[in-house]
Amino acid sequence: MRAIWDRKRNCGRPSPRSRPPSGGSKRPAACFAVLLPVKTVGVMGDARSYDYVCALRAVTSTDGMTAESYPFDHGFVAGVATRIINEVRGINRVVYDVTSKPPGTIEWE
């Protein structure tokens, strides 16, 4: 169980190198990582792996009642995903949640 909590903590740890360049008037109202209780098959090196999924979520919102996914540049999201997979043992897949609110919620429950 401790290993799962370590993965979760490391998955969501902010890093100055992984922050997007600032610009534009919209900034994320919320930005976080979620360790999903799902394992997926992947390839690490020359071997198959069976590890966890990390979901990233960032949204813009003016009122908290509605929200849209933050339009990060694809290259930025790909770079963050690569860093998480390389630096957090036990994660082999990273996904970016683009669900708006409604129908989704800002946070994952």
Image (tube, rainbow, N blue to C red):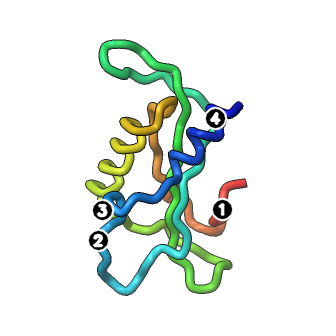
Kind of element beneath mark 3? loop
Q: Is residue 89 left or right of residue 67?
A: left
Marks 3/1: CA–CA distance: 22 Å
Q: Residues within 10 Å of mark 4 (few under 14, many from 20)?
A: some
Kind of element beneath mark 4? helix
Q: Earlier in the sequence, mark 1 or mark 2?
A: 2
Q: Earlier in the sequence, mark 3 or mark 1?
A: 3
Marks 4/2: CA–CA distance: 31 Å
Q: Earlier in the sequence, mark 4 or mark 1?
A: 4
Q: Earlier in the sequence, mark 4 or mark 2?
A: 4
- Looking at the image, which residue is at 52% across and 65% down? 31
- Looking at the image, which residue is at 73% across and 54% down? 109
> Residue 108's x, y, as percent?
67, 56
Q: Are marks 2 and 3 in contact (CB under 8 Å)?
A: no
Marks 3/4: CA–CA distance: 29 Å
Q: Earlier in the sequence, mark 2 or mark 3?
A: 2
Residue where numbered disc 4 is placed: 4
Kind of element beneath mark 1? loop
Query: Which mark is on residue 107?
Result: 1
Q: Quadrant of residue 100?
A: bottom right
Kind of element beneath mark 2? loop
* 65 vs 28, nearest the viewer: 28
Query: Which mark is on residue 73?
Result: 3
**Vertical arrangement, residue 34 with respect to residue 1, above or below:** below
Residue where numbered disc 2 is placed: 21
Q: Quadrant of residue 22?
A: bottom left
Tag 1: residue type? Glu
Tag 4: residue type? Ile
Q: Are marks 4 and 2 in contact (CB under 8 Å)?
A: no
Marks 2/3: CA–CA distance: 10 Å
Marks 1/2: CA–CA distance: 24 Å
**Vertical arrangement, residue 101 with respect to residue 12, above or below:** below
